[in-house]
Image (spheres, rainbow, N blue to C red):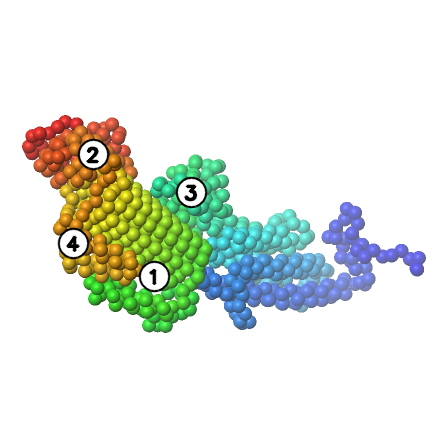
Amino acid sequence: MSGRPRKPLFPWRKWGHRPNDVRLVDVFPSDPTPYQFGEKLLEAVNTAASTVATLHVAFMALSAYLAVTVWSTTHLDLLKESPVRLPLIDVQVDLVSFYTVAPWLYCLVHLNLLIQLNLLARKVWALAKADDYPRLVERLHVFPFAHYLLHQTHPWLRPLLAVAVFASVIGVPLLLLLYVQIKFLAYHSEAVTWAQRLAVWTDVALVVWLWPLIASRSGHFLDGFRPEACKIGITAPWLSTLCACGLALVSGGGALVALVPATVPEPSAEAADGAVVLVDAEGFEAMLVRFVDRIGACRLLARESGKAASIPRQQLDRCKDIAAWRGSGVLGPTLWPTAWLFDPPVQELTQAGASAAPLIPRRYLDLHDEVLLQEQPSAETRHALSKDIPGAVNGADNASAERVAPVTERLSDTLRKVVPLKLQQRDLRGARLERAVLPLVDLNRAKLQGASLIEAQLQGASLLGAQLQGASLDWAHLQGARLLGAHLQGASLLGAHLQGARLEDAQLQGARLDWAHLQGARLDVAQLQGASLLGAHLQGASLDGAQLQGASLIEAQLQGASLSGAHLQGASLDRAQLQGADVEYAAIDDALLAGVALNGSQGTLSSAVNSLLIEPDWTPLTTTQVGELSAAVRPYLQDAEYARFEARLQWAMKPDGGRFQAAKEKAGCHGPQRLGCTESEDWLPLLVEWTCAASRSAPVRDSMIDSIAPVFGDAELPPVAGTLSVSALVQALLDAKGQQRCPSFTDKDVERLREVAKRNQSKPQAGSKAP
């Protein structure tokens, strides 16, 4: 080996020295002249610029490709989990896999571009130090990035060049990754959203770390933030560093507040009495809300909207009475930026008409007025499902057999032609599905809390164990649907069509079923505590063992219904139609039965303590009425069930077809029909307790007050029950109000009571007995 000392490969790498501290001529000692050195450096810059320019164009093409693919993804694709079809190459990729992997691949390509730009920037800054730089710069490659760093373009062109470089290298990647995350929010996948959020944060860290190195002449991180001499200061590279950090902060913050709605666990067993139980929600959103509540920064929170008020939600401590700065959460409290950006306004949720697509994608599926089937149906089938059949069903609800039968037959024929969707265990919370067509859909164990299904077509749908707390199903078509074990606490089903539906063991505490059509429905062992069934059509329905404590069944149509073993304690059955009903072993303690039609009702009540029966109606059913009832119920009952229903109606047609009674050992004080008290002293406390009950809703309380004067207008009760003056009753109620025993009473109620007392002052009070 030669005795010459080896020449160091990197002579500038000595302890305490940096590459930029060494002159360029020392780095290349073999170059005889600065001219030759500049030529070689220019050649190196142009070669690198050509390579990076190609990579930059490919990156922009990839950005456009990803943007188009994500933009073309619709809420229908998210619902059906349709594979993503990649443009140009026409390849299908699984939806979830694409939205999970694509952000990370894009982030990796962006990292490669930033590294290449950093290497090119070092060569460009080195070229700027060459002695013959002014002469060589005219031969520089046309890649805009190199000219942007060297300030060599026309003054009017430089701002456009700065915008182009900043947008393509920093702005588009950060905003595109954030858009991918926001676009997928409506799918409600916490795991995928976290993968996307981490990809955004990773890209933010890469930009904040590498761009200052690119923008600084020395290659030092902090130098990228220091101002430098520039004719047009607003386009200097150091200023782009500050803009990059600001945009990175916005993107990272946007990824933070783009939240999947918190998941509310299933109500616990303690909620079986219908009370709203506040439980701890799960998910990242719930964690943030609890953290903000713990530190008392209530200004960061948005209250829940009125639609979410009936949904069990997490308990807040320091921010119980929060006032939203902007927006309100659809499914409980959330951060105000989240509510403002991604939650639709309350007025938008309540509007029936179609709304324009929002600029920022919502985090809840919006598929109102859509025909949602696995395969697109024919135009005839589509029109029949969305227009013809719903209109015919609405017109045939209370029609004759000649009108009901054709509609039912046509519906069955149409349903045989469709291929339904399979949406088992899907997360569809807060979804907007008004007037959507979803016949025979499989929604077993799906999460539909707070969803809007107003006037939706769900004939024959399967919703076994579905979570529908607080959902809106007003006037929805659910004929023959299966909702066994479904959770419908606080749901609204006003006027819903549930003929022949299966609701065994359904959780309907506090639900609203006013004017719902439930002919032939099965509600055995259903939990209906505190539910409202005002004017509901329950002819031929089965409510055996149903829990109806405190329910409102005012004017409910229960002809021929089976209430065997039902629990009706504290229920209100004013003017209910119970002709031919089977109430064997039912319990109606503390129930109110004013003007109830009871002819043909049969069975021995298991308990009727303190029940109040006022002016019952024993009028038998006519042949015409029985025919109409049979026509309305026949399509939804099996042969054996229909035979029993017909037998009960035959009893209701007889002048004295039967009437239920209480068991002797459970008689207590039940009055002339064994359902009323025998002493006036017992009537007065009972009426006071009924009218003052805090659990009573306002309509029931108003009905109770209004019925005082008509029922006791002659100033005395039926002879068997003794006598009681109206004035004494009114005074007792006013005393209860003054003693704070009537928390539900309002000042308006007090005035109405005084008017009742005034109207009855002139009436005879003979035989009245003070309480």
Distance from label 1 to label 2 (Cα)? 47 Å
Kindly state the secondary structure of the residue where label 3 is placed.
Answer: loop
Q: Label for residue 653?
A: 4
* Image-based side of 12 in relation to 342, left or right: right
Q: Label for residue 459?
A: 1
Distance from label 4 to label 1 (Cα)? 33 Å
Decide: few, some or many residues near mark 4? Use Cα within 10 Å; few <14, some 14-19, many ≥20.
many
Q: Earlier in the sequence, mark 1 or mark 3?
A: 3
Q: Please give the name of the residue rendered at 45% of the width and 55% of the height, measured from the top-left corner.
A: 425
Residue topped by disc 3? 268
Q: Earlier in the sequence, mark 4 or mark 1?
A: 1
Distance from label 1 to label 3 (Cα)? 30 Å
Q: Please give the name of the residue rendered at 44% of the width and 61% of the height, measured from the top-left corner.
A: 422
Decide: few, some or many residues near mark 2? Use Cα within 10 Å; few <14, some 14-19, many ≥20.
many
Kindly state the secondary structure of the residue where label 4 is placed.
Answer: helix
Question: Along the line of sight, which residue is nearer the eye, 283 or 735?
Answer: 735
In the rendered view, tell whether residue 343 sits above or below residue 749: below
Nearer to us: label 4 or label 1: 4
**How far from the left and from the top, in percent, is residue 639?**
29, 61
Q: Label for residue 117?
A: none
Q: Please give the name of the residue rendered at 40% of the width and 65% of the height, measured from the top-left corner.
A: 420
The quarter holding residue 302 reads: top left
Q: Please give the name of the residue rendered at 12% of the width and 40% of the height, measured from the top-left corner.
A: 710
